[in-house]
Image: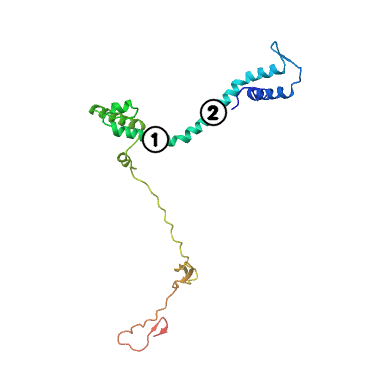
């Protein structure tokens, strides 16, 4: 992993590596370079660059070793876990009656949970009740008491059937009817007008033969 510091847009360790390679390959023979009052020829400049680069190189090498070590640890972890579990179980089987000895051997022993006193139980219940009140939480019985109260007003509107028009000429009005299939049909009502009676009329006392009613003989 390269360092975060940069020179001319590249990290310091990358630039150091490039300079070392460049001096070895392209630094003109017989040339020298003065830096901070010190004059370096090709061999001296390369040596100085190597000294400056060493901490970066060491960090990269150790980082690579660390990554490889982590991978090796992860690969060995299942077998190690199984082995130490068996060792701990075996020691507990042999010396389970002496928890102090198990502790000295490095075997963790389960801690016995202390029972609460009556005072501690009362305090815990009071604290839980206060917490519920602060949070506004409700139990199933409290929620069952939450119901709507008072009368509820409901308005229902029923549509009136359409009025049947009676023709002015005395003809029978036609009322639409709906069959089982939903198809409309028409039904004629009896006509409204002057009805003529055809029932026989009784003759006056002692009279026989046809009688005349409204000018007609019966």
Quarter of the figure with residue 16: top right
Residue at the outermost left position? 118
- Per the model, the C-alpha gap separating discs 2 and 1 is 26 Å
> Which residue is nearer to you in this view: 21 or 158?
21
Residue placed most toward the observer, 131 or 54 = 54
Residue 119, disc: none
- Residue displayed at 50% across by 31% down: 70
**Image coordinates for residue 179, horizontal then vertical, percent:** 45, 69
Q: Would residue 182 appear left or right of 42 to someone viewing this image?
A: left
Disc 2: which residue: 65
User: On the image, numbered disc 1 is attached to which residue?
Assistant: 83
Residue at 48% from the left image edge and 36% from the top image edge: 75
Q: Nearer the viewer, residue 191 or 201?
A: 191
Q: What colour scheme does the image use?
A: rainbow
In what element is the residue under mark 2?
helix
Mark 2 vs 1, N-terminal side: 2
Label 1 sits on a secondary structure element that is helix
Q: Which residue is drawn at 72% across and 18% down?
A: 42
Which of the image's four quarters has the N terminus?
top right
């Amino acid at each position: 992993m390269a360092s975060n510091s940069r020179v001319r847009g590249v990290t310091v360790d990358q630039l150091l590596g490039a300079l070392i390679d460049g001096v070895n390959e392209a630094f003109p023979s017989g040339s020298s370079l003065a830096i901070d009052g010190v004059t370096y020829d090709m061999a001296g400049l390369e040596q100085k660059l190597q000294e400056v680069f060493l901490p970066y190189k060491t960090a990269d090498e150790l980082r690579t070793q660390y990554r490889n070590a982590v991978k090796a640890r992860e690969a060995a972890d299942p077998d190690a876990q199984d082995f130490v579990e068996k060792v701990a179980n075996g020691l507990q089987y042999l010396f389970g009656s002496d928890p102090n000895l198990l502790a000295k051997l490095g075997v963790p022993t389960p801690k016995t949970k202390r029972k609460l006193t009556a005072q501690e139980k009362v305090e815990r219940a009071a604290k839980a009740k206060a917490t519920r009140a602060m949070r506004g939480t409700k139990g199933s019985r409290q929620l069952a008491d939450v119901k709507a109260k008072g009368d509820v007003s409901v308005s229902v509107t029923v549509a009136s059937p359409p009025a049947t028009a009676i023709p002015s000429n005395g003809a029978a009005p036609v009322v639409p009817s709906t069959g089982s299939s939903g198809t409309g049909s028409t039904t004629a009502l009896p006509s409204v007008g002057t009805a003529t009676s055809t029932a026989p009329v009784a003759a006056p006392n002692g009279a026989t033969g046809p009688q005349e009613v409204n000018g007609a003989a019966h």
